[in-house]
Amino acid sequence: MSPQPGRPRRSAPGKPYRRPKKDPVRILAFEALRAVDERDAYANLVLPPLLRKAREESTEARPFDARDAALATELVYGTLRRQGTYDAIIAECVDRPLREVDPPVLDVLSLGAHQLLGTRIPAHAAVSASVELARVVLGDGRAKFVNAVLRKIAADDLAGWLEKVAPPYDEDPEEHLAIVHSHPRWIVSALWDALGGGSAGIEDLLEADNERPEVTLVARPGRSTAEELMAAVGEDSALPGRWSPYAVRLTEGGEPGALDAVREGRAGVQDEGSQLVAVALANAPLEGPDERWLDGCAGPGGKAALLGALAARRGAALLAAEKQPHRAGLVERALAGNPGPYQVIAADGTRPPWRPGGFDRALVDVPCTGLGALRRRPEARWRRRPEDLAGFAPLQRELLRQALAAVRVGGVVGYATCSPHLAETRAVVEDVLKGRGGPAAEAEWIDARPLMPGVPALGDGPDVQLWPHLHGTDAMYLALLRRTA
């Protein structure tokens, strides 16, 4: 008589059945990966509530401490960053196409592969912990499959596996880099083109995409200072920003929300590249009045909060517009307490409610593929497709056209995007200036490089592309334009 479905199989005589050990760290990591896979969630949004729940449900006998949180975070982000590499290795160790492996099983295998190949966890411990996780979340039967596959993976280290699964660089450089550095091939090709071709920099960039980014704070001018943040964090746990006078880098992680300045809105979490874009727009040379500023794509509010603080110091007013009402609410929260006049509205920047020519400065940080923030959102590289570019293209061009129409003659517009893809950066600006797909904008380039003093490797200009491997920032792009007629 076969055992009933769902019941554990009876052990052989003399070997009592042992219930699997529940490891809260690995169960949490598995739940996060499932949310990313099933719901298209983002790890940076899924993980904090899971960690909070784990802390609340822990006991004195089994506390969930900072080391547990750090390990869970590493398992989630490390597995997502290296997913492409681990998929290629797992495919060599199973007897079926990878698409035929159940996604929950593949998640457990990927977590195990990361522990074996991407951490210092001993091989026997990595396999044992992964098999126990499989017993808890998959059942004993599929745990045996997990055990067999991970033992095959444990037979070699990462370098050895890469020699087996990646083609030689000389034969197929893009596929070699895609597997070794865990990026889709089309993204490798796009980043290579954006760097200008040639071999210089591409491996450094791909490696930087796979590193955990620092948490960077911004001290909003007139409300807090970088020195105040440094003192609050402690000099042993923080460093000044590399380029922005308002930046502080947290060297040991920590919880930014625990700082008074962050809780009170006088400071925030903001990548240094994002800060540089806002500061460059604010400091661009301008003749005539400098009284009305516009952020036409303001959500979730980081740049708007910095622009609002900079505008307040000059007596200028900021209008922050965001199409999605819930994101407009985030902008409102970010700007709350700003010392100068500001207004937040829910409005579509392609159909603006404001009158043309009414602003002196305008920023449009347009929706894009987000290929410049793969360090922070590693799952995005596996979700994006080349055809996504065509979907964003009309929106990006129209937002820039409307921003140019929003400023007066002599006014300045900043076009920004967190993507280095040429189709989302210079091609957009050139198309708008030449009238492709719409009326030509009468504007001229402003050299943005002098407006980022001290920042090296800014290229030939007049626009600026920042890079993770060169500047330690997200790959932010900025073009500055002056309306001429």
Image: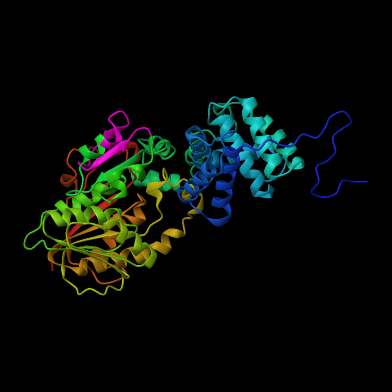
Where is residue 369 shown, x and y percent of the image? Answer: 41, 55
Left or right: residue 177 compared with residue 237: right
Q: Quadrant of residue 192?
A: top left
Where is residue 48 shown, x and y percent of the image? Answer: 47, 47
Residue 269 visible, this angle:
no
Left or right: residue 38 compared with residue 408: right
User: In the rendered view, how is the structure colored?
Assistant: rainbow
Where is residue 39 shown, x and y percent of the image? Answer: 55, 56
Magenta span contains residue 234: yes
- Name the one closer to the observer, 203 or 247: 247
Please give the name of the residue rendered at 59% of the width and 39% of the height, measured from the top-left corner.
Answer: 24
Magenta span contains residue 250: yes
- Name the one closer to the observer, 432 or 338: 338
Left or right: residue 282 compared with residue 76: left
Please give the name of the residue rendered at 20% of the width and 75% of the height, measured from the top-left corner.
Answer: 355
Q: Which residues are magenta?
A: 232-252
Q: Quadrant of the C terminus?
A: bottom left
Q: Quadrant of residue 17?
A: top right
